[in-house]
Image (cartoon, rainbow, N blue to C red):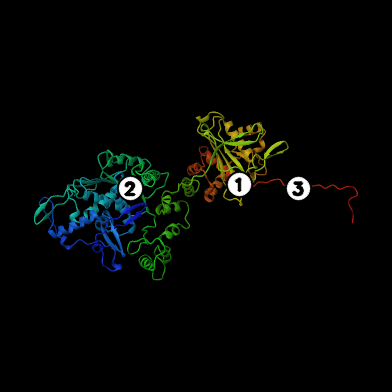
Amino acid sequence: MSDTINIYGSNIKLPECDSVENAINYGLPRNQQKWKRKELPSFFNTVEYDKFGNLILTQQQEKYAEEEVRRCKNGVYAWIGEKLRFIPKRYYFYLQYYTLEDGSAPDFREADRLWFLFHQYWFAILWVLFIIRTKKRRQGASSQACSNILYEAIFYKNSNCGLVSKTKEDSKDTFTQMITMAYRLLPVFLKPKQVNKEDSVTELVFAHKSQTVKEGTAVGAKSDEGNNSKINFRAPVINVYDRGRLSYVLLDELAKLPKDVPASQMLSIILKTLVKGVKRVGFAELPSTVNEMTKGGGAEFFKIWKYADQFKKSPTINRGVRFFQPAYEAYEGFIDEFGDSVIDVPTNEQYEFLVSKWVVRNEDGVLISELSEDDIKLGAKYYVSVKRREGLDGVDLEEEIRMNPCNEDEAFLSAVSDCAFNSLKIKSRKKYLEDNPPVLRNVLFYRNEETQEVHWRDITKNEESFHWRIRSFPKNGEENKFKYDSGVKYPTRIQDGCIAVDSYSNTQGGRKYGSKASAWIGRRFDVTDPENTGRPIGLLYGRPLEKDSLHSQVLLAAEYYGYFVYYEHTSDDYFTYFRGRGKLGYLGRYPLSLIDPTKRSEAERHRGTPITPFSLTKQLDNGISFFENHCDWVDYVELLDNALIFDPYDRTSYDMVVSFLILISCLQEPVHTQQKRKEPMIKTYEKGSMQVA
């Protein structure tokens, strides 16, 4: 009975093991059950060719070659660390016959075995055109893909293989160092006859599979053996491979393509060469670390990744599937002697092996290696996800996460280098909201003409372009709270929250003009209710046909919640609107915290918020602090999107963020409420009531 193994959500059935006794390393002691590349027998030291350059093998050579070809085509079982493991065919070829660019042989890694099993499983599903693989740095994915290209050219007929990397130079280097060199070092019985120049740096062309002979009689190439194959490379351009047929292609580091070569567009063109009608005729590998998301190819790579989601749809939208392994899998320095990842606390055996291999101290006992004994004790997961990130922030933290992502979110959680706020925390919150959508009610406020009280109602379909999105309302009985002072109406719940508004300049025009109105309702932080306070709870965003519609909704909301309103003081039409309706008391005056301390004593506190350099700088500082410490208080994805691209030197283009900065600045302003005296300031006494001692 064969085993089934789950690899990245795929249940993969392993082939039957005919005989455990025939498995590689059977019968050896446990400490010798390791993968070791088998040296080519000495009887291959001399080989013969006929006058046409075709290989002639002896019976002994041919018997050996046939067994190795069988293993390359079927895979093999091996005992490694007292575990019987199936080595899939492409992984066997990679381990046994592929040569890395530094001239060494690949080491066995259990994590790599899982990747090749995953590849073999999805390669056999014919609707799949490619696998997109998000990875850590220096994982060896490019070498493995190049090995697969060689495998294709050797074992399949009429193979047309190619590769593209992030630059023309990288494409050439990958071709010459990872394919051409590896091809030249193949054993003769796996090496197709090359018909173009051996030192060609642009293309390998193979006429046919090398022939063999039995007892002097020539045997032609078998029908299932590769021939008429070629491998080449191309510079990264949109239409890099736009005609003909591709059998196997490596699209390396697409997340690092230049901005003028959108990876998703380039892939869509290449995919047409992998099909003939609805039939698949080719396959692609897309391994890459993720570059910065707003520049280069990071966002484009994510677009491909997003639509290659086999967990949501099968076939997927772009006929690709995705694969990811955490950085702590096969992390150098935490791989035991059998190739297994030491993810958690190592066993004594693993600890002793890793310390002897990686921890180095000089004669004075001073550590001179990167890893210490204490690091080894942590295990790879803690070391990568915690220890390596300690003390890092900003760009440094971004780079470390990008190099060694521990989950898919981190792989695409690259910071925006020119973002004014902590983009890592913003993106993390955005991902959370996408997976856990908040409950927001779409409403408009209106006035009951009989009672003059304000209420709210759900919007209709025709009102979707301009309405409030509310997270929470006042408790029953706390709506419409106000007072009169010297004949002026004032809100009375100003200690609970406020409203901030960034309006637009022209009164009419509707959607003709680009700027939009944005208003926020927010609650001040209450230590007794931390889950529902200190955050925005309402957003009004859009472009009504007339500006009075904006002022009307803002005023109605202010009355309903009992809050002050703070407009950015760029024009005074809001002042006129509120005064004309007897609601001037609902407009808050300049917060003291937004006035330069050296000018507060003589500053005139208009209704709104100042637009002085001091005020704008203070608002930005407050925003930086908020996103750094309280990003998890934001329930509006559109605010997070705008915050990522906000330019503090071009505020007019980011109405939503501007009004939000006003909001959090006003929410931080201390509220001074007048306390009623228990005793009058001046006491009066009846005549004769005072006694003199």
Look at the numbered disc 3 and give the secondary structure of its residue.
Answer: loop
Name the residue type under label 2. Ile
Q: Position of residue 31 (x, y in %)?
A: 30, 68
Secondary structure type for disc 1: loop
Residue type at mark 1: give it: Arg
N-term-proximal mark, 2 vs 1: 2
Q: Is residue 411 above or below residue 456?
A: below
Of circles 3 and 2, which is in front?
2
Mark 3, residue position: 677
Sequence order check: which comes first, mark 3 or mark 2? 2
Q: Quadrant of the N terminus?
A: bottom left
- Residue drawn 45% across the image and 59% down it: 387
Q: Which residue is mark 2?
A: 131
Crowdedness near tag 2: few (<14), some (14–19) or many (≥20) residues, C-alpha within 10 Å: many
Residue 495: x and y in percent read: 65, 45
- For disc 1, the marked residue is 524
Amino acid type indicated by mark 3: Arg
Observer-nearest of 100 and 544: 544
